Image (cartoon, helix red, strand yellow):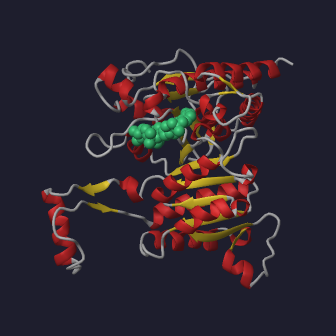
Amino acid sequence: MNDRYERVDVPTGGEPVAVSDADANELDVPDDPIVPIIHGDGTGAEVGPAAQRVLDEAAEASGREIHWMRVYAGESARERYGANLPDETVTALEEFRVGIKGPLTTPVGAGFRSLNVALRTRLDLYANVRPATYLDGVPSPRRDPGELDVVVFRENTEDVYAGVEWEAGTEEAERVREFVEDEMGEEGLLHDGPAGFGVKPISEFGTKRLVREAIDYALDRDRDLVTLVHKGNIMKFTEGGFRDWGYEVAEDEYGEEVITEDTLWEVRDGEVPDDAVVVNDRIADNMLQQLLTRTDEYDVLAMPNLNGDYLSDAAAAQTGSLGISPGINVGDGRALAEPVHGSAPRYAGQDKVNPTAMIRSGALLFEYLGWDDAADAVDTALRAQIESGRVTYDIERNLDGGERLGTSEFATEVAERIAARSST
Ligand code: NAP
């Protein structure tokens, strides 16, 4: 392995996670898997190792061992290898099927394109899954934060993530203007003077595989409702297409298991069979307010990329802190877990930010591997730690009588809770 993986810290043991020949989604998971990890930029350098400590303890408590393979992207890759994203990093994530990453910084305006987008598109991780569930004891801006229990499925390869843009004043932008005005007949639509242009592709293929993933998740986890969130009243052929193709999946592929809201009221008088999932839709701006006003009516939310970005941060804020919100990017037979938050550069090097989001992202990866017992051990220890009031700044600042811990101290205490529980 060493000769193929020059710019990687190759582990000495462990077995790769594999897929079965018959089904690209069926994983063969050893008890000692090799798991690539990118610590991330800024505060990623702190939450990455902190999460590893907790995840190692949970794996050990469930009779397993993770063989970490440190791979590089962003600042650490530039420092070591003079490259933003060495090929070996992508190859390792492809070959070993699963991985976890901390946040990576993306410059606004000029500079390189997002490495997060590059990773998600190169690995075809088409669903970004972001559960927003409340943890008892975290001060939240909501009166009744326990009502929030939604899972956002955000399309991960199209829409703004296609990244097709032309800068104002360039020859390319002028050619796009000419095309729109002369060839497409939209004369008088654009203001004179410099303008940037972007393309927002939303395809039947990209939409249907994302919506399928959301419906399958709802069926597997006994969830009742999948809501398609779109802005199809204005963007009829992109966001409206998402809505229509989403309903097609629901109506054509699942038989009696899935009911659309129309059928529900027209044919069934609102009666939902116990093991069925209902699919409905909401316009994105309405959804953002309904998540605050009718929180407990929502469950699994499926949407194009940009809606998902806004909505998952808004949902995360309702749980009390971005520092506790996990995520996982999923493709066919591969997954890359990562927290919702960014690199929070203003706190870098202070051993201050909350590693919970990164730790919970690891727990989502455990669930993906079928290690539900290890995921439960992480969840139980985190909840107990937060209820003890010994927490990081983001929670402590709104907590009466809490005690402020640093990133590493918090993670160590969570790991100790897992160890103590497993030895009893
Ligand atoms: P951010 O890094 O998420 O930080 C925004 C604020 O969220 C922080 O100032 C802090 O709020 C809170 N926060 C974030 N992480 C936290 C943690 N672990 N514990 C406690 N609080 C936390 O967003 P940003 O400042 O807009 O973005 C910084 C960089 O990250 C950008 O380059 C952006 O492109 C990148 N980014 C990367 C990813 C990714 O890698 N997937 C995702 C989003 C953004 P308070 O100061 O109020 O405490």
Query: Where's residue 92, x and y in %?
Result: 45, 31
Choose top left, top right, bottom left or bottom right for residue 357: top right
Q: Is residue 79 left or right of residue 372?
A: left
Residue 133 at least partly seen: yes
- The residue most toward the right is 424
Q: Nearer the viewer, residue 10 or 295?
A: 295
Residue 99 at least partly seen: no
Query: Where's residue 61, x and y in %?
Result: 75, 22
323 lies above or below 310:
above
Q: Is residue 297 left or right of residue 175?
A: right
193 lies above or below 26:
below
Q: Nearer the viewer, residue 205 or 114?
A: 114
Q: Nearer the viewer, residue 17 or 64?
A: 64
Quarter of the image with the C terminus is top right
Query: Where's residue 40, x and y in %?
Result: 45, 30
318 lies above or below 27:
below
- The residue most toward the front is 400
- The residue most toward the bottom is 266
213 lies above or below 237:
above
Query: Where's residue 387, x and y in %?
Result: 77, 32
Q: Is residue 12 left or right of residue 345?
A: right
- Who's the residue at 64% across and 36% down the image? 360
- The residue most toward the top is 12
- Who's the residue at 67% across and 80% down the image? 262
Q: How many marks overall?
A: 0
Quarter of the image with the N terminus is top left
- Who's the residue at 58% across and 49% down the image? 129
